[in-house]
Amino acid sequence: QVQLVESGGGLVQPGGSLRLSCAASGSIFSVNAMGWYRQVPGKQRELVAQIFSSGSRQFADFVKGRFTISRDYAKNTVFLQMDSLKPEDTAVYYCKVVLRTSYRTSLSDYWGQGTQVTVSS
């Protein structure tokens, strides 16, 4: 019953910015981490950034200094602020949430449907 709704993707020029949002809802007991991955056809899905319940953040080397990740704990929403976008950032961006649906369950991964980000002039 967990649902992830992504938004914020689109077309942007090189050097521009986009802000992605992902809201988790449904049977959520606790959230361990929320993050973003991206995938280009023919390549493996790769981590972009994630934020843990402790507040600790992890970034891929290729986005350090350009992207930031934040979280609204009250709304179970994670944001990815993307600045100084490059054509090579073009990909489908997927939200991932690690959570428990109840006190009886272990941690599980849940994925959003993906949102297209295209960086082109």
Image: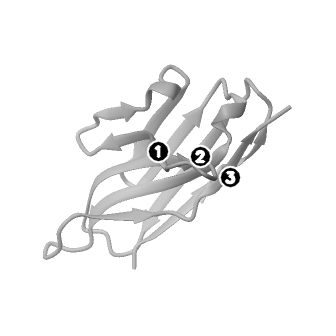
Front residue of 28/9: it is 9
Q: Where residue 41 sits in the image (x, y, percent)? A: 64, 53
Q: Where residue 101 sits in the image (x, y, percent)? A: 26, 72
Which residue in the structure is indicated by mark 1?
Answer: 46
Front residue of 70/37: it is 37
Front residue of 112/31: it is 112
| Residue neighbourhood size for the residue with mark 3, other residues' Cα within 10 Å, grouped as few (<14), some (14–19), many (≥20) | some
Dot 2 or dot 3, earlier in sequence: 2
**Left or right: 10 as drawn, with respect to 113:** right
Which residue in the structure is indicated by mark 3?
Answer: 116
Dot 1 or dot 3, earlier in sequence: 1
| Residue neighbourhood size for the residue with mark 2, other residues' Cα within 10 Å, grouped as few (<14), some (14–19), many (≥20) | many
Which residue in the structure is indicated by mark 2?
Answer: 20
Q: Is residue 21 visible?
A: yes
Number of the label disc, if any, that sits on residue 22: none
Q: Where residue 95 sits in the image (x, y, percent)? A: 48, 54
**Left or right: 49 as drawn, with respect to 29:** right
Residue 89 picture quarter: top right
Secondary structure of the residue carrying tag 3 is strand
Distance CA(mark 1)–CA(mark 2): 17 Å
- Mark 2: amino acid: Leu
Q: Where the N terminus falls, by quadrant? A: bottom left
Q: Are marks 2 and 3 in contact (CB under 8 Å)?
A: no
Q: Is residue 75 visible?
A: no
- Mark 1: amino acid: Glu
- Mark 3: amino acid: Gln
Q: Residue at x 34, y 33 (%)?
A: 57
* Residue extending furthest toward the top: 65
Q: Are marks 1 and 2 in contact (CB under 8 Å)?
A: no
Secondary structure of the residue carrying tag 1 is strand
